[in-house]
Amino acid sequence: MEGDITQMGALIGAGLACTGMGGAAIGVGHVAGNYLAGALRNPSAAASQTAMLFIGIAFAEAFGIFSFLVALLLMFAL
Amino acid sequence: MATEAGDGLVIRPMDQFIVKPLFGDGPLMWYTPSNTSLWMAFSLIAVVLLLVLGTARRAHVPGRMQMIAELSYSFVFNMVRDVAGRDALKYFPLIMSIFVFVLFCNVLGLVPMSFTPTSHIAVTATLALAVFLSVTVLGFVLHGFGFLRLFWISSAPLPLRPVLAVIEVMSYFVRPVSHSIRLAGNMMAGHAMIKVFAAFAGVLGFGAFLPIVTISAVFALELLIAFIQAYVFTILTCVYLRDALHPAH
Amino acid sequence: MKNTTQSRRLSNLGDRIKSLQTNEQPGFDRDHPANQAHVAWRMVIDLVAGIGVGVAVGFGLDHLFGTLPVLMVIFTLTGLAAGVNLMLRTAKEVSSAEREKSSESDGANPGQSTGQADRGTRGDACGN
């Protein structure tokens, strides 16, 4: 066992930051599921709303990637 | 490459991306022949084999190689025409070279024990920077300072325009970054994933058929991604070229 | 007499060339829903790269001028705005392509503008 307490804190923080990716997963599932529910109710309007679907997915996923970047920074840049 | 050490599971998925010199262990300079340059040379040779030797016979009824070469040619040709417009066809050779180079780097990287040059940000950033610089220079040469109209949105209300101009300039500089990160990230993530599953197969013994089935599926997905990422890289090049040719919104 | 049949054949030829050109698009079907996933991924990376570039530029300028938090905050927000801008532009491209396609299929077979018919023609295009 080597390393100091700062490194331990950084690694624990990196692990905690990774929970944010779970939040992104929930968000993407919510967006896609609601899109599918709406598309099954009104299939003729579904094709015009794919752009909105992509925007929703992108926003949800981007914040997951931010938490991943924070984890990487804590692990390697500190 | 995953190695099974004495003390259980050791996964080293990123070891496949290490750049090594081909001969000896000397220092790695820019002129050292390394595995990156070797596989880039392989992809160049494959491109020449397909596009030059494949079409050398110029048969009226094309064989397989000539068929593939003509298909890829017309695929890129239609893409440039549809996305960037007819007056962008002058720059078709640049876009075709980018497409076939990226495509062959991606696909040859899927050969076992090989190396993927496009999984390195250094390689993709060079490509993206070449596109960025040539498109910017082209815009200034064609339009002079009128190229700056790209950043000045005349449809917005006047007090808002300077703010939007700052955001547009920022977007313009973000584009090469995302252009390069997208390709490198996709390539790296897929290969690392395959290596992680391979490490699982290494320690499971008779249960190894599960990871092997997964690897086969992931490999098929990777083949699709290798093609789609080359396509996306090229189509974004076309989009940037269109912005340079027609800067006014 | 011969002239009219010839001109009819000529116009038929034009139609046939057009249909062949639209049907024999080489490569993969870029409008297939499974192949549109890269659009979402493109938006994600644009957003993240926007903020990344903003932070990097702000931090560099702060380092240069010695005003640490100020410029970094400003440029991070600008980077976020730039990412959203790029994302909305991509979304506009997608929706305009969608509209073009639906208007095209309206012209080809009038009265069948539902998403179902659209999906069917796309499935056919995927086959070749």
Image: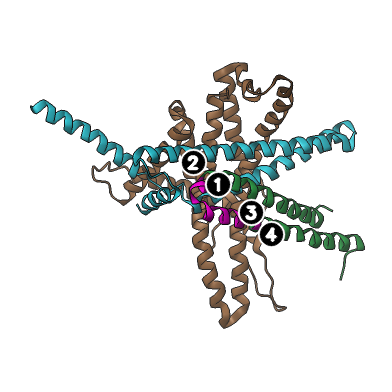
Chain colours: A green, B brown, C cyan
What's the magenta bit mostly, secondary-structure-wise? helix
Which residue is tagged 3? Answer: A31
> Residue B43, relative to residue A2: is it above or below?
above
Give the residue displayed 67% in from the left and 34% down from the top.
B171
Quadrant position of the N terminus of chain B in the picture:
bottom right
A54 relative to C123 in the view: left or right = right
Question: Residue A26's mark?
Answer: 4
Spatial separation of the CA atoms under disc 2 and disc 1: 9 Å
Spatial separation of the CA atoms under disc 2 and disc 4: 28 Å
Which residue is tagged 2? Answer: C98
Which residue occupies the foreground of this view, A24 or B29? A24
Amino acid at pointer 3: Val
Q: Please check whether the numbered discs 2 and 1 fall on a single chain.
A: no
The location of residue C98, given as percent across then percent down, is: 49, 41
Spatial separation of the CA atoms under disc 1 and disc 4: 19 Å
Q: Which residues are magenta?
A: A30-47
Q: Is A33 one of the magenta-colored residues?
A: yes
Spatial separation of the CA atoms under disc 3 and disc 1: 11 Å
Q: Residues within 10 Å of mark 1 (few under 14, many from 20)?
A: many
A72 relative to C33 in the view: left or right = right
